[in-house]
Image (cartoon, rainbow, N blue to C red):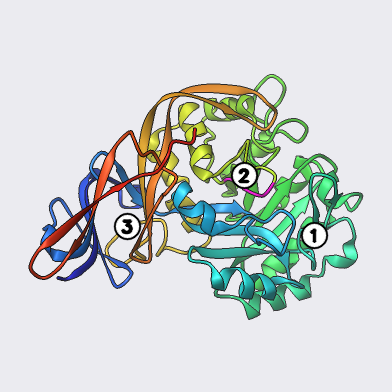
C-alpha cells in the first residue's frame, strides 16, 4: 500500500488549483500524494468515503484568538477544529512580546491543530478583555515597543506571520493613531505584514487606511457604523476603494461586533467582496454571533458570494496573506490538510453583530478534517442525516467499519 489515507468519491474544490470536479485525494507521510479521478481503494491503509461531500483544502482562519488559558478571551483550538473544518488557526495578537513564549510552549506546541500567530504591538498582548473588563492594550503607549516586537519575531520566526495592532477608542483609548505607526515600524523592520483592527473612532478609518501597505490586512472590513466602510446611502467610501487598489487585504474578522449584513450587502453590490473570510472567534463570540469560520462562510454564501469564492477566501487567500503556499491547497506535495464539508439544506437564521437576521436555505457543515494525513472525525455532526464509512485496509483485505457523523446542532 502506497498511501496512508484515501478520501474517496468527493467533489474536490481547490480554488488555488482552479479545480472543481469529482476527484479522489490520497495522503502519504503527511502530504498530498495523489489527486485523481479514481484511486484504487486497495492502495491505501485507510479510506474515508467522501461521497456527497465537498473535499477542500483545510480551512485557514486568519483571525482567531486561541491563547486558551493564557488570556481571558482565548478558546481551545482543538475543540473547534473538526467542527469548523479548520486545520490552521492564526491567532490575531492575543500575545505580545512579553508573553509569546508562554503561548508557544503551553498552547501551540501542545495543540493537535496548527496554530500560527501575529505578535501584538502591545508588550502584554490583549490582557483586559472580558464581559466586565475592557482595558485596551494600546491605551498606554509605554507598552507599545517596536524593538520588543522585532526581537520576538526573530525568536519565533517559524510561527509568527505578522504584527497586529488594535486601534480605536476601545483598544487604544486616547492614544490615537500612534499605536498604528509604532506597529508599522515593527512590521517594516521585521519584514512582515501588519494586521490592523479598527473599532470606534478615534482614530478614524481615514487615518488608518492610507498608512496600510500592499499585503497589509484590514480586519473587520465590513464593520458597522461608526468607522463603517460605506456611507449611510450604502455607497462605498473612496478610501476603501483606494486601499483595495493599493493591494490592502480585506478580512472579515466577524467577532462579537464587527460584521454588519447591511454593510456586507453594500460592499458586495459594489464588487468589493472580502479577500479573506475569518471568524475572529473568541470566548465572547464562540456561542454567537460568530461561532466559527464555517458559520461566517455560510453567511457570505447567503449574501450571494459564490461557493468557490467563499472557499477561496478561507483557503488560498489567507495562505497567501501569511506567505504559506504549502497551505490552502491540495496540490500534490503540499501539506495533507483537508476539510470534508457538506452543504446542508434547510432553514437557517443567521445573526450579525448588530442583531440583524438573515434567513438562508443552506449552510456549510464539517464532516471531519485531515491534519497532516490523520483523519479527525467531527463527533458533533449529524448522526441521522447520512452515514459514511471509514475503512482500515490490510495487505489482503479491507475491513469496513460504519461511522456516523454525530448529533445535529443547529
Relative placement, left or right, of 264 versus 386 is right
Segment colored magenta: 279-283
Please state the horizontal and vertical placement of residue 122, each as a whole percent of the image.
79, 64
Closer to the chain start, of discs 2 and 3, is: 2
> Counting other residues with Cα less than 10 Å from the Cα at mark 3, is it few (<14), some (14-19), or many (20 or more)?
many
Place residue 199 in its image quadrant: top right
Please state the horizontal and vertical placement of residue 209, each as a whole percent of the image.
71, 46
Q: Which mark is residue 330?
A: 3
Residue at 67% in and 56% down: 74
Which residue is tagged 1?
A: 127
Q: Which mark is residue 295?
A: none
Magenta run includes residue 282: yes
Please state the horizontal and vertical placement of residue 178, each as a whole percent of the image.
84, 57
Place residue 399 in its image quadrant: bottom left
Mark 2 and mark 1: Cα distance apart in space: 18 Å
> Counting other residues with Cα less than 10 Å from the Cα at mark 2, is it few (<14), some (14-19), or many (20 or more)?
some
Determine contact: label 3, label 1, CB under 8 Å.
no
Closer to the chain start, of discs 3 and 1, is: 1
Closer to the chain start, of discs 2 and 1, is: 1
Q: Which mark is residue 286?
A: 2
Is disc 2 placed on a helix, strand or loop?
loop
Amino acid at each position: 500500500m502506497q498511501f496512508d489515507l484515501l478520501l474517496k468519491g468527493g467533489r474536490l474544490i481547490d480554488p488555488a488549483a482552479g479545480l472543481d470536479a469529482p476527484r479522489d485525494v490520497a495522503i502519504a507521510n503527511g502530504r498530498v500524494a495523489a489527486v485523481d479521478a479514481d484511486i484504487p481503494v486497495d492502495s491505501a491503509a485507510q479510506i474515508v468515503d467522501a461521497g456527497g461531500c465537498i473535499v477542500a483544502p483545510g480551512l485557514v482562519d486568519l483571525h482567531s484568538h486561541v491563547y486558551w488559558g493564557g488570556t481571558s478571551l482565548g478558546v481551545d483550538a482543538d475543540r473547534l477544529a473538526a467542527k469548523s473544518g479548520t486545520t490552521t488557526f492564526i491567532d490575531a495578537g492575543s500575545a505580545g512580546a512579553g508573553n509569546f513564549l508562554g503561548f508557544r510552549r503551553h498552547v501551540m506546541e501542545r495543540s493537535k491543530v496548527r496554530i500560527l500567530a501575529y505578535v501584538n504591538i502591545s508588550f502584554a498582548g490583549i490582557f483586559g478583555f472580558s464581559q466586565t473588563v475592557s482595558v485596551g492594550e494600546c491605551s498606554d503607549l509605554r507598552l507599545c515597543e517596536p524593538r520588543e516586537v522585532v526581537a520576538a519575531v526573530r525568536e519565533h520566526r517559524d510561527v509568527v506571520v505578522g504584527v497586529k495592532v488594535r486601534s480605536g477608542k476601545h483598544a487604544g483609548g486616547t492614544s490615537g493613531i500612534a499605536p498604528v505607526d509604532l506597529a508599522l515600524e515593527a512590521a517594516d523592520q521585521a519584514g512582515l505584514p501588519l494586521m490592523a483592527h479598527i473599532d470606534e473612532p478615534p482614530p478614524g478609518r481615514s487615518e488608518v487606511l492610507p498608512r496600510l501597505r500592499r499585503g497589509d490586512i484590514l480586519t473587520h472590513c465590513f464593520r458597522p457604523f461608526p468607522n463603517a466602510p460605506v456611507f449611510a446611502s450604502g455607497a462605498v467610501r473612496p478610501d476603501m476603494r483606494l486601499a483595495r487598489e493599493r493591494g490592502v487585504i480585506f478580512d472579515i474578522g466577524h467577532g462579537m461586533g464587527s460584521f454588519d449584513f447591511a454593510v456586507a450587502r453594500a460592499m458586495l453590490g459594489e464588487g468589493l467582496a472580502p479577500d479573506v473570510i475569518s471568524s475572529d472567534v473568541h470566548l465572547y463570540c464562540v456561542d454567537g454571533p460568530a461561532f466559527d469560520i464555517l458559520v461566517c462562510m455560510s453567511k457570505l454564501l447567503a449574501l450571494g458570494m459564490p461557493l468557490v469564492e467563499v472557499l477561496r477566501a478561507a483557503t488560498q487567500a489567507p495562505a497567501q496573506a501569511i506567505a504559506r503556499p504549502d497551505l490552502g491547497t491540495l496540490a500534490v506535495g503540499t501539506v495533507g490538510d483537508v476539510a470534508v464539508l457538506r452543504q446542508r439544506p434547510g432553514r437557517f437564521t443567521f445573526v450579525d453583530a448588530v442583531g440583524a437576521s438573515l434567513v438562508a436555505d443552506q449552510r456549510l457543515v464539517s464532516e471531519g478534517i485531515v491534519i497532516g494525513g490523520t483523519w479527525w472525525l467531527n463527533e458533533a455532526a449529524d448522526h441521522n442525516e447520512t452515514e459514511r464509512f471509514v475503512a482500515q485496509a490490510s495487505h489482503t483485505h479491507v475491513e469496513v467499519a460504519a461511522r456516523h457523523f454525530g448529533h445535529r446542532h443547529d
